[in-house]
Amino acid sequence: MHPTRLTAAVAALALSASLATALAGTASAAPQAQPVPPGHGKSLALAAADTAAASGLDELRHGADEDLVRTSVTPWSNGLYYAAYQRTYKGLPVHGGGDAVVLTDSSGKVRDVTGAPAPALRLSTSAKVTAGAALATARGQLAAVESASAPELTVLLKAGKPVLAWHTLVVGTTAEALPSSLDTYVDARTGKVAQATDKVRHAEGRGYHNGNVTIDTAAGSMTDTSRGAFKCGGQNGSAYTGSSPWGNGTANDLVTACVDIMYAAQRESDMLKEWFGYNGINGQGGMVPARAGLTQVNAYYDGTKTTYGRNQNGTNQLTGIDVVAHEYGHEIFDRTPGSAGSSNENGGMNESTGDIFGALTEHYANNPNDTPDYTVGEELNFTGNNQPIRNMYNPSLINNDPNCYTQLSSGTEVHAAAGPQNHWFYLLAEGSNPGGGKPNSPICSGGPSSVTGIGIQKAGKIFMGALLLKTSSWNHLAARRATLTTAKNTYGATECNAVKAAWNAIGVPAQSGETDCGGTSTPDFSLSLNPSSGSAQPDTSVTATVNTSTTGGAAQTVQLSASGAPSGVTVSFYPTSVTSGSSSTMTVKVAAGTPNGTYPITVTGTGSATHTVTYQLTVGSTTPPTGCDNTEHSYQGTLASGQAAAQPDGSYYYSASAGTHVGCLRGPAGTDFDLYLQKWNGAGWADVAVGGTAGADEDTSYYGTAGYYRYVVHAYSGSGAYTLGLSAP
């Protein structure tokens, strides 16, 4: 099944007799929807949307014991409504697939349907492990537990297979004293942890970052009952008490920190209502409470609260507008359909969502003490280098984070993986050459020559509407399709084509079934490769598919060519030219004797415009190094004596669960290469395992908790090529 769309069979069921009746205008009784948000009466339009969605999807079944249960209806502009559905099996909620969202108008016409993939289910719902035993196992993952929700019996889809499991959220700290919020599933048959995903991503008042501002509080407590149970206090969870004016405006006074937190969070809530018509952070007018005073270089959301620490030098609290709005952006991602997923790509889009809402809130607040921009944490000096921690208009300027979708891999750390969607949002809001003192933004290979922005308010509303189409299989391809649907239905062809151009500009290809924006546009096309890299031994060949799509005007002829191939490597295409929207097979032939190494090859498409994409060819072995048969991944590199390199691929990886990390280094004969496994401790990289031999070959094995890891290979003496094999939980 396509990850963002129901299968043809399911779609046919969705257009069953009951839905066809609804679309024809014959009303049927709808089951009770979730309460309508304050300020929205139960209008005839909403009732029609309920009926259409319920009639079509409440009847949808994958099997005799399965249903889709409507969990929410969210009003939108232009008479649109988003109806979200969760799959159930014998009355138990299903997590990890099968959820769906229907976009409908007030007449009951279905505008779009998105759904996460799921197999048909068949399993016993009789638990052999008690809820109490499962809770004890879940709590045992953390060194200290602050809270744990009551276990709920569910069906977890893990790697496409159903597992009967007890689901609970455990909040506390790890053995390394790091904050953790483990969304945990304990197998109800074996009692073992089946999956644990960490949700932590890593009145008048005198604020430090924002100056003298107005905030909403109770008379004697930093509590805001107008926004649910929102409050701010210290690490014990209690709201600070006192009277207005709150705080003293100094850098490390914690009441002052709460002034900054409440100001930013309240502005974000107001922005959502005023700009988008969305009812606050959680969609129901409220938000989780906040805590100040964490003694770490960290700020995080864990599903129950947001928490804020200090910068590396201890000179101020991490409570600037964009950081606070970023953390509450995680709550928006968590509370919209599909919740927060567990893959690195999904995690990167979650981090990007926080960055996007940080930028939106800065622009809405327009505070002279923190002028609106598209960088993250620029006011806070997070790590002591006076640099922001992320850059949206050119992500590569910070830690060489990826600008383009094609640069992502399954191991890209989630904060770095925010780069492509952040880049997309800037291009949509401001364009590639906005002028007016705003920075230019680069376009990835294969994209249009330029992109024209539509303004941050429109861009933000399109993004928010797309989040309401989110399912548990959310990724960049799904986001492209959802933003196009939202743009066309909320605004029209101009904005829809701008969304399309921005996705093309970061290398996210066109998707089957995505909306046709309509309107007229300049003839253009996009170019992409699948896969964008490959490996071959000498005297063999490797292939890739060159995909094209029409991004403007009518379809056109695209001539294909390649350049930059090393001596001994030839590149051919069949066919050599295609009509945009079609594909060609690229064959890369490696002659005998071609030296091992990695070579970039430029693929060019020439039509009304010229676009290029890069194919990374690796010549040589990709099998595990000798004696490392138990490792899953291999990486190669070359070092001169005294040099060091991080792996995988100069970056790091995220392990979502506890387990054993295995490293296996094989270096050049006669050298002394060292291998270190490092873990991020919130402030820096710390060695957790070191190879124990003197020579070219070293092995490590380390059992660790969930977190960010990387290997460092150091050429202590001697030079040459090495291979690193590794496995992670």
Image: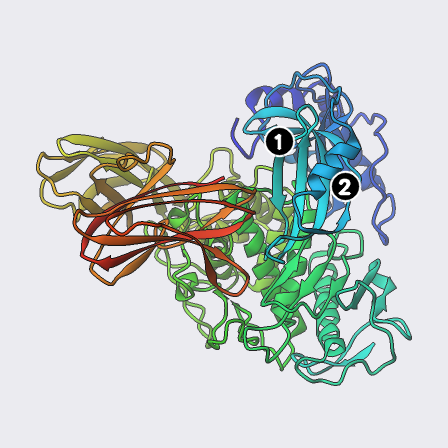
Query: Relative to the observer, which residue lies in front, 158 or 172?
Result: 172
What residue appears at the point 85 percent right and 81 percent down from the top-left corner? Answer: 244
Q: Which amino acid does label 2 sit on?
A: Val
What residue appears at the point 74 percent right and 60 percent down from the top-left corner? Answer: 273
| Residue count near mark 1 (Cα–Cα under 10 Å), binned few <14, some 14–19, many ≥20 | many
Q: Position of residue 121 (x, y in %)?
A: 64, 19
Query: In screen coordinates, is 709 left or right of 86?
Result: left
Answer yes or no: is residue 493 visible.
Answer: no
Q: In this view, does 605 lie above or below 220?
A: above
Q: Residue furthest top?
A: 64
Query: In screen coordinates, is 470 left or right of 514?
Result: right
Query: Relative to the observer, which residue lies in front, 446 or 335?
Result: 335
Q: Quadrant of residue 687?
A: bottom left
Q: Quadrant of residue 45?
A: top right
Q: Where is residue 226 in the image (x, y as percent from the top left)?
A: 86, 63
Which residue in the protein does label 2 denote?
Answer: 73
Q: What residue type is labelled 1?
A: Gly
Q: Where is residue 422 in the image (x, y as percent from the top left)?
A: 50, 58
Query: Relative to the observer, which residue lies in front, 405 or 334?
Result: 334
Query: In screen coordinates, is 304 left or right of 388?
Result: right
Front position among marks 1 and 2: 1
Which residue in the protein does label 1 denote?
Answer: 97
Q: Position of residue 132 (x, y in %)?
A: 79, 34
Look at the numbered disc 1 and give the secondary structure of its residue: loop
